[in-house]
Image: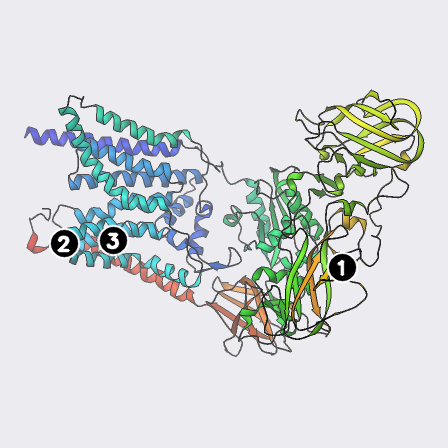
Amino acid sequence: MRRLKASSSEQVVWRARLVLGCLALVALCFQQAPGKILADSKLELTAAPGRFLSRALHVWDPHTASGQVQSDAFGYLWPMGPFHWLLDTLSVPDWITQRLWWSLVLCVAFFGIWKLCNVLQYGVPWTRFAVALLYALVPRVFGELPIEVWPMAMAPWVLLPLVSPRARSGWWRASWSAVAFALIGGADPVAGVATLVVPAVWLVSQQKLKLLLGWLGFVVAASIWWLVPLALLLQYGAAPPGPRRMPVVGVVIGLPLALAAAHYLRRLTTLSVSRGVNRRVVPAVVACLAVAAAAPVVLLRPDGASSAIPAHWNAAAAWLDEQTAPGSVLLLSSTTEPLTALVKRPMAALTDDVKRRIDSGVGDQTLRQELNHDGIRYVVVRNDLEDGTPALAIHESLADAGIGRVAYFGPAGQTRIAYPSVEIYDVGATTPGRLIPRSRLVAVDGTADDVPTVVTALGGSGGAVLRADAADKLDGLPLIATDDQAVDRQPSAVVLRSVQTGRSSCLHLGVRAVCSQDQAQGADEPNGLSQTVQLPRAASYELRGTALPKDGDALEKLLPVPGAITATASSRAVPAPEGRPGAAVDRDSGTGWRADPDDPAPSLTLKLPAARDVRGLRFQSDTYLDASRPAAVMLHFDGSVPIRATVDTDGYVQFAARQVRTIQIDFTATKPLQDAQRSPVGVTEVVVLGADELRKAVDPDRRVPSYCGNGPAVRIDGVTAPTQVAATMRDLLQRRPVSFRLCGATAVPLRSGSHRVEVMAGGGLLPVETTLVKAGFGDVSVTPVQGVDVWRPNPAELTVEVPDADEQSVLAVAQNYNDGWEAYDSTGRKLTPIRIGGWQQGWVLPACPEQVVTARFMPARSYRAGLLLGLVALLAVLATAVFFRRTPKRMTGRSTRR
């Protein structure tokens, strides 16, 4: 009787300790960045769980990345999604919801190991407690996301019903284990399946093969709700993210290690006591390990934690949703969070071509045209996050393309220029669909990255299909070659392009140049374009192309103004013309000269066209130049004995009037313009008192001297063909694209066979695109491309009102292509699907009058059926676990444990 009372009392004590252990884990979760939302792979699950779960019920997600098959959202339908939705409904703050879920994860792992060790009689209470605590803590340290740790937390519970020593039927054991497995969810399928390894090994080792088969059947039944969506994802969508090593290893290895530790810690304690070591040493060491495991969670501050989603993002999302104009939203960032979690308007994917063009700092109407073809209405620029691209480059590209800002939100972001945190730009009217006549289509023998350049080179208003996509669907389209591969029919055009056009060290804020060598980016074809062209038959081709001004001496030779002061310097900080020495005397406060940071003795030499009476100098600077102001100088007049002078607070240096032609200025002392940061000396302008009228500005509207040979040099099979370019000084100084073409002859006759075409940099210009167009191609009048509206009754269905089509056409919808989409015309005839532009969904339409086309994503039925069947199967497994007889009749009163 006394033993029973002592045992009962000990159980009460350990239960209290278990509660205290769980409370310690909860406290550990809440002490980490209290009041802040931690970075998570599914921010929408925290910010808008109801909307997230609603989208997860549909296999096609038109809201994300220009439309796509759900990635792994279905895996959050149970239990993580409902948990967040319930707390959101109860208005629990987001950061508390996150900590409560983490607390649940750790406590489930903690209690699971404790119960499993008790059931298997491994170790003694204190070793079970210590191992359970370590099992819960270690994954928390190495697992950044709760979804990574959840399978490991549930692993003991999957095994527990199978090893229970009580008399239980096989149905009961298999069904409760399957219920536990269902609670893992399908967000990390590989880690979830890994939880089955230890139970399977145990059943095989116990030779319970019949129970093993029944158990596997229950597990499959409890997993149908995510197995079917996963199968559809593998068939119609991109492969899910690769398995994370930590969860898989933790599940397979961690559980056996925990059980072994509970068992051998007891033996280690007994062994140490037998050798004269105090019995408290081993527990103390284990306690230290637990503290060490918890220390990183306590001491380290998580990256990306925020008090809440900033209000300016909520305001930006609300503004976008208030707009009635059709079109998607493009966020210029490596991550679409948090906007995707907040906005209802569909989000577009940032393509490689658009990113390269915007990153270059060079834009024109073709950029706007490309965005329009992609169905994008609004571009969102985020300045609250450094993303590797200078904010100036993004803003200059959009400005050059004529894309204006219509709204902005939040404080100044983390950029050199104080831009608001979030800015919204309006691309202009667009439609989510286009009807492209066959006569405006071409077939591109290349990759999807080549398509935008091809469309732009051919005028920009038509459409393109990859040759492989057009096969057996739109045969006979004009062929456009883009690489060195031999073609089996005559190309109507050949397009050479530079993938990365580079970026100048000087970008522009309106008329102000902001220069830094850190902004520069080299071109992948710095010397020009070169490609072998294969022609099956002889033909004549016209050559035209686009070039960008190239920083260097050749470009700067075009800038001097006759009769003006010229300047040279000991060094310069950037090679761009806006930072040349002459920028200090060009009467343009938007440019300026700055010495190289490594120049030990910077100097600037001014040369007047003729000797003049000069009585002083004035140095002008501004904050955009990012240079120190001159404080003291050494002046050399026509090589005479130098004089020292101090620059006053207004930038003046006064001296006795003297007649000079050359003034060399050695900068001997400087002072920071804004703060104590050390930077090289620089000036925006040097005013020569007595000869200021000789400081002459470059006329931005002055045209580049036009003559044959002023453009890039073209060589075809080694024979040089000069080109001519038409441009203004503004084009050169602001690095705008300029066009060039061959002089004289309208077409170049080319024989059949292989030809080497080289377009070399020259005249201060770098060719970035060159097109050989077959004589006569594109001269005929054609039917225009028409925009069409798209309605979506539900995410997996769309309806389009198609106008009259006088010829065979392609209906293109601005969403990602997928084989699962099927479309039917008004007569019920199935339309042929085709990929447009390398990525857009399209269907081939015959010439027909106005009609309505309906399209459906066919896997949607299987997806919803799989979810419904999975729910029924899961309820059936749960019912079996709850209502089935626990003890088989023939085993009543007997234990199954041996």
Amino acid marked by disc 2: Gln
Q: Secondary structure at mark 3?
A: helix
Label 2 – label 3 distance at C-alpha: 20 Å
* Above or below: residue 614 compared with residue 107: above
Q: How dense is the environment of label 1, judged by Cα within 10 Å: few (below 14), some, or many (20 and up)?
A: many
Q: What label does residue 271 carry, if any?
A: none
Q: Is residue 58 left or right of residue 310?
A: left
Q: Position of residue 468 (x, y in %)?
A: 54, 69
Quadrant including the N terminus:
top left
Q: What type is the residue that disc 3 sits on? A: Ala
Residue underneath mark 1: 740
Q: Earlier in the sequence, mark 1 or mark 3?
A: 3
Q: What amino acid type should be assigned to the residue bearing mark 1? A: Phe
Q: Nearer the viewer, mark 1 or mark 2?
A: 1
2 or 3: tag closer to the N-terminus:
3
Q: Nearer the viewer, mark 2 or mark 3?
A: 2
Q: Residues within 10 Å of mark 2 (few under 14, many from 20)?
A: few
Residue placed under numbered mark 3 in the picture: 178
